[in-house]
Amino acid sequence: MDGLMDFRDYVTAALVLLAAFLCFAAGVGLLRLPDVLSRLHAATKPQILGLMAIVVDVAFSNPDVGTITLAIAILLFQGLTAPVSAHMVGRAAYRTDHVRRDLLLRDELAGRQ
């Protein structure tokens, strides 16, 4: 039993460090990237991946039906809402002309705002 607890502690440490690194990467991306769309990408990808690491850690550390069900619900709803909200923020930035158009490779919305 003691070996199992050591293994869980190592997994917990690895997942928490991964989540912390992803949060740090998101912060650096928000500060360093040049435009709204790049910053949006830097904020959403690490956010959902860091949340996934923490939720998997909680479910792994406390493996009962209620915790695992809640973890699945959290991941499902965050996985559905984060891309939609990022898309809406990106469209709002495009419509209000807060996008650096010189950085766009292809502007599929040109003329259709």
Image (spheres, rainbow, N blue to C red):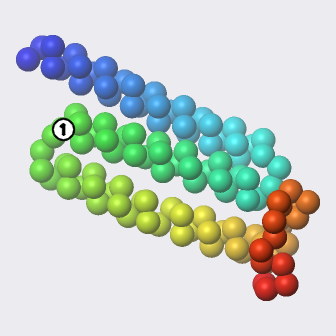
- Most extreme residue toward the top is 3
Q: Is residue 98 above or below residue 11?
A: below
Q: Residue at x 48, y 50 (%)?
A: 48
Question: The residue tagged with tag 1: helix, strand or loop?
Answer: loop
Q: Is residue 64 above or below residue 93?
A: above
Q: Position of residue 11 (x, y in %)?
A: 31, 25
Q: Position of residue 108 (x, y in %)?
A: 77, 74
Q: As drawn, which residue projects farthest toward the right?
A: 102
Q: In the image, is 87 to the left or to the right of 48?
A: right
Residue type for callout 1 = Asn
Q: Position of residue 35 (x, y in %)?
A: 80, 55
Quarter in which the C terminus is drawn: bottom right
Which percent across, then down, holds residue 15? 39, 31
Instruction: From the viewer's side, name the closer residue of 112 and 26.
Output: 112
The residue drawn where x is 62% and y is 43% is 26
- Residue position for label 1: 62
> Is 33 displayed left or right of 13 in the figure?
right
- Residue 27: name its quadrant: top right
Direction bottom: furthest residue:
112
Q: Residue furthest left?
A: 1
Q: Quadrant of the image for the N terminus?
A: top left
Q: Residues within 10 Å of mark 1 (few under 14, many from 20)?
A: few
Q: How many discs mark residues in the rendered view?
A: 1
Tell me the residue at 43%/46% (across/down).
51
Name the one closer to the observer, 27 or 83. 83
Residue 22 lies, with reference to residue 102, above or below; the image says: above
The residue shown at (27%, 21%) is 9
